Amino acid sequence: MSDSLHLACPHCLAINRVATARLADASRCGKCKQPLFTGAPLELTSANYSALVERSELPVVVDFWAGWCGPCKMMAPIFAQTAAVLEPRIRFAKLDSEAEPALAGRFGIRSIPMLIVFKEGHEIARQAGLMQGSQLKRWLEPHLV
């Protein structure tokens, strides 16, 4: 593993280089000075997807969801709680498949909730359906930095 990672600021989308050993040290963006990690899932859109997922060397787990989906609503607090525990070893993001149908379609999302782990924009794992917190942590363990 490299001694540093490139990742985008969730606020201004500037790419930052962060020492891997210092990820948990309340890293701040070199451009806007905002925290690089919030402990909560980020909202993905077509405008920020490239910076936050494709240009990030830190793995990103994306929850594809929709507001009408009951299991998605049940998954939301589990996903948020897991983000608070595992970040900054992996970034958490949510993509509303109804608000961003082209982006969801790009990944062939046919059932939700759908979780996909990306590394430098490439899909490395996929899991459909509702998971409990312990299941989610166990599933993400091999992908943590």
Image (cartoon, rainbow, N blue to C red):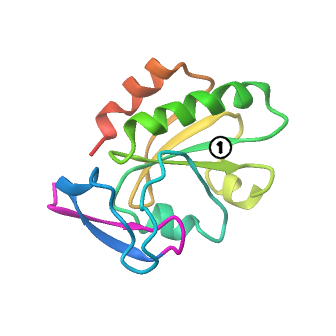
Q: Which residue appears at 77% of the width and 41% of the height?
A: 66
Compared with 125, 51 (above or below) is: below
- Which region of the structure is painted magenta? 1-13
Q: Who is closer to the viewer here, 17 or 112?
A: 17
Compared with 65, 1 (above or below) is: below
- Element assignment for label 1: strand
Classify mark 1: residues with Cα within 10 Å, few (<14), some (14-19) or many (20+). Answer: many
The residue type indicated by label 1 comes to Phe
Q: Seen in the image, is 133 located left or right of residue 85?
A: right
Is residue 137 magenta-colored?
Answer: no
Q: Seen in the image, is 52 located left or right of residue 86?
A: right
Is residue 6 magenta-colored?
Answer: yes
Q: Which residue appears at 36% of the width and 48% of the height?
A: 88
Residue 33 spot, x, y in % from top left? 42, 73
Residue on which disc 1 sits: 64
Q: Can you tell which quarter of the image residue 11 is in?
A: bottom right
Q: Which residue appears at 47% of the width and 39% of the height?
A: 83
Compared with 144, 11 (above or below) is: below
Residue 125 spot, x, y in % from top left? 44, 39
Q: Who is closer to the viewer here, 139 or 8?
A: 8
Q: Who is closer to the viewer here, 36 or 17?
A: 36
Q: Which residue appears at 33% of the width and 40% of the height?
A: 143
Residue 60 spot, x, y in % from top left? 44, 50
Compared with 1, 75 (above or below) is: above
Could you tell me what secondary structure mostly forms the magenta stretch? Answer: loop
Q: Seen in the image, is 139 located left or right of residue 72?
A: left
